[in-house]
Amino acid sequence: MNLIDRVKNGSSIPEVELVAKSEGVSLDMVVHGLLDGTIVIPANPLHTSLKPGGVGKGLRTKVNANLGTSSDSCDVDLELRKLRTAVDCGADAVMDLSTGGDISAIRRRLIRECPVMFGTVPIYQAGILAIDQRGTIVDMTADDMFASVESHAQDGVDFMTIHCGVTQATIERLRRQGRLTNIVSRGGAFLTGWMLHNDRENPFYEQYDRLLELARQYDFALSLGDGLRPGSIVDASDRAQFQELIILGELVQRAREAGVQVFIEGPGHVPMDQIVANVQLEKTLCQGAPFYVLGPLVTDIGAGWDHITGAIGGAMAAAAGADFLCYVTPSEHLSLPDEHDVREGVVASRIAAHAADIVKGVPGAIEWDRKMSAARKALDWAGQAELSLVPELARKGHQKTPTQEHACSMCGKYCAMAVVEQYLGAKTTTRCE
Amino acid sequence: MNLIDRVKNGSSIPEVELVAKSEGVSLDMVVHGLLDGTIVIPANPLHTSLKPGGVGKGLRTKVNANLGTSSDSCDVDLELRKLRTAVDCGADAVMDLSTGGDISAIRRRLIRECPVMFGTVPIYQAGILAIDQRGTIVDMTADDMFASVESHAQDGVDFMTIHCGVTQATIERLRRQGRLTNIVSRGGAFLTGWMLHNDRENPFYEQYDRLLELARQYDFALSLGDGLRPGSIVDASDRAQFQELIILGELVQRAREAGVQVFIEGPGHVPMDQIVANVQLEKTLCQGAPFYVLGPLVTDIGAGWDHITGAIGGAMAAAAGADFLCYVTPSEHLSLPDEHDVREGVVASRIAAHAADIVKGVPGAIEWDRKMSAARKALDWAGQAELSLVPELARKGHQKTPTQEHACSMCGKYCAMAVVEQYLGAKTTTRCE
């Protein structure tokens, strides 16, 4: 029995209890969310090092960090260090997007050490195997694609990005639309190349029931990929993008009927004034399925600082109801991220997620701010460091320039907190001290 | 005659012509904005190195970088390097907030080398002089305050932050409100301490006409400071904050009647769902005066990465109509910023400003994105670097891991752009190539 079966049958559901406890919400709320599909708990029973986490309505907004080798940069130890950095900085999930070296061996090493939800994009490996064995991606077979999914499932992958909505109909909409940057999703591009060359439908769409059967059997969650996500601001929210989303909405319904957990991936490059509409349409077209957004990047020109571009869009998307933020690192559009990029990417996304959780009213969110500001008012430097996003780094930051005991080096002895307390403090009531 | 007089009298206005040209808008539009107060061009005739810039409705959203020494960290050469870094990274304005060393000498050195709008907060120097000469801030005289303003004007300062809205009535509202972090504005704290100790009204409010006369005489712009800006999320948008804003609205009206350019400073720590209201109320209460926001910071817990916290709030504020973003650096709440912090702070604010300019429809904004994405699609690395926020740093980022000619190290030979072009490229029309 998979998780949804156990929830329905009233069997033991320790994963769900753990999620409810760690989120500070009732078990009943999480159970209800799992049953109506607005919450997912991707937890492959074969991922034995996993501490399960939940994604969806009423829960803390989650952050994913992408890791993985490429054909140009393939160092397994570096990827393991990046994994530890991501987890230490507070990532709730990681995805292994490796496309270089022994992809299966890398995945197995990473998964063994990964305490958070672990995701992959199996089409990468299927495509690369086809190149290695037959010389080109387009000679990949449908069985290759499903074999890749099954081998990932057997390794304990908790959720898989599968671009089931890249259909011949979607590609025709793209063709008629005309875009500046056609397809920027790597998985979407592999499938589109294959479909156009072979003049065939997407096997993950055509044989969707086969995919659902695998998902049921191994109990992994489907992350329905957005192969048609816009890769530039001028392409955002076009007909091709929403054609794919409409198809994904149908596939959500079929996944739920099959008792398979499912969520939806979203854009991409989106101007600020279209973000709310993107989230609202995902929620309506896909019947409240959790929304997992990449960014969104609110401008195309942020290369070198796209973790910031993504944090702006991610905060707005999450505030509008997105549930899961895929980080963007400073190296986006430039190169494979290194450890520093991973750290900056995770932290930027966590800030976006938390800023949104304050206004979403997620339990405990604003209390963190209240405690931090109380420590700040008390000029309690140790307390502030402990409450910061990455305490060790906050301590270093404060020590960068000399500091007196009762103020930071920004204001030195002219600290506003200290001046006001001297004259106003005794005469004023404060809210929470 | 000051700038407004010359605009009214039809005299020569080269500053205005320069602003219209650099913004790509009509001279008539800028003139109209100056006359109705929705645009300011802070340009002290004594600031001879200035290339004038404009702030306000219909213009590009501007970015300010705060510089300056403190009692704990006082290195003039470092401040000069920070000035150059800020300008090289694209800051449209700098403020010298020095409170350590020979404050006048530092200001004069910085101004001489500063090609962008230069601002200060004269009350800092008045307060510190009082401490040096009389032992305490509260022994500062009203004449000390105005003398500081005049000496800054004589040095060529283009705009000055003056906390005219910190009145006895405002402080009484603060007292009744009860706040977690009472006053976090340093200038607001100096004045509040002085007013409470001496039981007197704020001289900048009581003798506002004297301030307007100085502003007219030297032709600097007033940046009406928000001494009561919230210093924590739980204090945001309270009665104390809006009491001050109401008073500032009255002072805007008097400044305009006196032919003095004026704009308004804004918060602060503000949750995402209150940002639009803050901007809209500033625009109504202050009759469309340009809005200059510090952040806003959308959470209190971002220490170490508050440039990101501020970029999220800044983008949202600017998209809602804010005109001028004061940067926040990674060292905010921790220490005085160094050169690296200045760079990161300016770039983060520029991203926020540009993301907003896309949706504000500022002339030319989206064209930058379109060019960048066209270069990206063409895998034109040199073109992308030239179009990036700080071209030299973008080139370094791309070279961090080995890269093939036709792809970056993220995807290596499995570049989505390349795959799709091979199969889809020839069959599809694109919008702009």
Image (spheres, coloured by chain):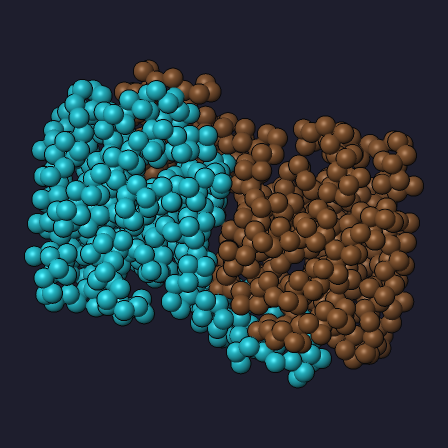
Chain colours: A brown, B cyan
Q: Is residue B341 at all visible to an observer of this figure?
A: no
Q: In the displayed structure, does residue A221 sit left or right of residue B397?
A: right
Q: How many marks?
A: 0
Q: Residue B141 location, x and y as percent?
A: 11, 29
Q: Is residue B32 at all visible to an observer of this figure?
A: yes
Residue found 81% across the figure and 69% down from its top: A202
Above-or-below relation of A101 to B167: below
Farthest top residue in view: A426
Q: Residue B212 location, x and y as percent?
A: 13, 43
Q: In the displayed structure, does residue A8 sit left or right of residue A51?
A: right
Residue found 50% across the figure and 61% down from its top: A299
Residue found 44% across the figure and 56% down from its top: B356
Residue found 11% across the figure and 49% down from its top: B216
Is A198 in front, or is B35? B35
Is B252 in front, or is A204? B252
Q: Residue A170 location, x and y as percent?
A: 72, 69
Q: In the displayed structure, does residue B217 sit left or right of residue B338?
A: left
Give the image quarter of residue A247: bottom right
Give the image quarter of residue B59: bottom left
Above-or-below relation of A264 to B138: below
Q: Residue B96 location, x and y as percent?
A: 25, 47
Q: Quadrant of the N terminus of chain B?
A: bottom left
